[in-house]
Amino acid sequence: MTVIEEHRMKMNKILSCILIEWRKLIKSKLSIITACTICFVPFIVGIFAAMMKYPESFKNLGLISAKMEMIRITDWSSYLMSLSQVISIGGLLIFGFTTSWVFGREYSDKTMIDLLVIPIKRGTIVLSKFIVIALWSYFISIIALILGLLAGKLIGLSGWNSITVFKGIFTFAYCTTLTILLSTPVGFFACLGRGYLSPLAFIIFTVLFSQLGSALNLGEYIPWSIPSLASGITGKVIFNLGGIISLFVVSISGFILTIAWWRYADYN
């Protein structure tokens, strides 16, 4: 067997695993739940934008308080920035929940042993699962972005131009990518806890930890705070090289630990 043929066989196995995992995800209720949940991102931001655009109408309904007036979503720049901020925080929950299901279901449905006996490397199975998680996370994020753009147009926000929109979409994609990368440790905790409880507890902890760190001005040192800081949640976009490196370290560590668990853990 030549090197090219061997490489082709490996790629075919990876693609087969990806298709299998994709079908499992699409046919599950999780796909509907996460797709519907992600729609809250443009809905929440759109509501606030509409309140700022038509304050008198909402004041008459008693829906605007003094605190809410502090939220300034007055144009496309601030609107797109707000979309990035919400996806950075909400993505930790939604993408993390997807990851916990993809890995945790193998234990809850008792299909883990069946996966381990098929003639495919365990690392290949883990890789295919993370690829499917990333693809699905990007897919539902694109849905949120498209709905957000449509909502912004319907509201009639000012300041639409190609530079502003491109910058906003780029920031959204950048923050989404960083948030997706933080899903790998969730996969490890799903394997470690052999189910859903441990990863869900870990997700809640990371969200609370990131918010606490941001409140104490320590967010740039906490990997789970990096996406929201990059979205400009503090009023300005913060790019900290050390924070980005720590995020990648956490992501790679989660990936390696998950593969190691699949390879060496005792499943008896």
Image (cartoon, rainbow, N blue to C red):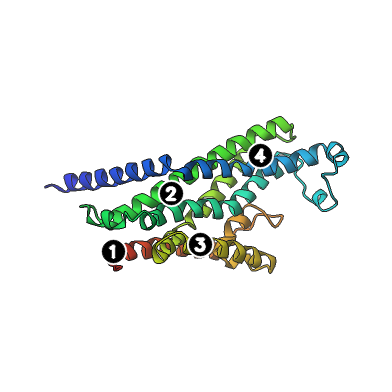
Disc 4 residue type (three-letter): Thr
Separation of disc 4 and disc 1 at Cα?
47 Å
User: Which label's residue is closer to the chain start, 2 or 3?
Assistant: 2
Residue at the front extreme, as displayed: 109
SS at badge 1? helix
Callout 4 environment at 10 Å: few (<14), some (14 to 19), or many (20+)? some
Sequence-first tag of 4 and 2: 2
Query: Which residue position holds label 2?
Result: 133
Which residue is identified by label 4?
164
Residue 248, above or below 31: below
Q: Earlier in the sequence, mark 3 or mark 4?
A: 4
Q: Is residue 206 left or right of residue 248?
A: right
| Residue situated in front as seen by the camera: 28 or 171 | 28
Looking at the image, do the residues carrying marks 1 and 2 touch, with CB atoms under 8 Å apart? Answer: no
Above or below, 176 against 212 in this view is above
**Residues at marks 4 and 2 touching, judged by CB atoms closer than 8 Å:** no
Q: Secondary structure at mark 2?
A: helix
Decide: few, some or many residues near mark 2? Use Cα within 10 Å; few <14, some 14-19, many ≥20: many
Marks 4 and 2 sit apart, C-alpha to C-alpha, by 30 Å
Compare marks 1 and 2 and give the one earlier in the sequence: 2
Q: Is residue 8 left or right of residue 56?
A: left
Is 251 positioned to the left or the right of 71 in the image? left
The amino acid type, in three-letter code, at marker 1 is: Arg
Q: CA distance from mark 1 to mark 2?
A: 20 Å
Verify CB contact (< 8 Å) between mark 2 and mark 3. no
Mark 3 or 4, which is nearer the eye? 3
User: Which residue was labeled with disc 1?
Assistant: 263
User: Which residue position holds label 3?
Assistant: 247
- Residue 38 falls in image quadrant: top right
